[in-house]
Image (spheres, grey):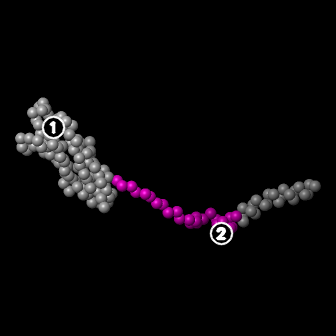
Amino acid sequence: MLRKSLIGVTLLLVLPISMQAKILRSGFGSFLYLPEKKCVIPVTIDIGMYVEILDVQNLSIKLKQVEFDTYEGCTEIRVKSNFDLELVCKVKPTGMVPGEYSCSIDNPKVRLDLSENVAVRKVCVKAEKVKILYAAPGLDLHVADVTVTVIPGS
């Protein structure tokens, strides 16, 4: 009985070692731990459309009188993007000073530039038939807001 137990214990001890050697031989081809290239996994990315108008918090347009009831003013915006786009502006008067307000952007098309270059465009506002008699005199009156919209180009 002791002999059968001893043979059984010996087999149980030797069996895992021989199985491990067999796995090493079939998996790596040698008993040494050498690096092997097993697979190459491709990495992909989805890049979205990106546009940024720099220093928006510092932008403002100061209207200056060019005729009795006509005022004009401009500011420059700096644009970075990774696609072709067109800039469109819309002016919304606050009602503080009545008049006919319009806005324009010189060269509104911005072409794709994948470098760190920044496109500079001029945004201008013109106020005509301004009724200055309806407003009290003051400095830096908030008379309108300009919204710049980005339209992807083709």
| Coordinates of residue 121 in the picture (x, y in percent) | 21, 53
Circle 2 — which element?
loop
Depth order, front residue of 53/109: 109
Q: Position of residue 90 (x, y in %)?
A: 23, 47
First in sequence, mark 1 or 2: give its number.
2
Q: Residue at x 34, y 53 (%)?
A: 50
Is-magenta flag for residue 143? no
Residue bounds of the magenta highlight: 23-50
Most extreme residue toward the top is 136
The image quarter in which residue 3 lies: bottom right
| Callout 2 crowding tier (Cα within 10 Å): few <14, some 14–19, many ≥20 | few
Q: Which residue is mark 2?
A: 29
* Residue located at (13% from left, 32% from top): 135
Query: Circle 1 sits on which residue?
Result: 98
Where does residue 105 sit, x and y in percent of width and height? Answer: 20, 52
Residue most extreme to the right: 1
Instruction: Please determine whether, in this image, residue 5 is positioned above or below residue 129.
Output: below
Give x and y (percent) for residue 101. Answer: 17, 43
Tell whether 98 sits left or right of 15.
left
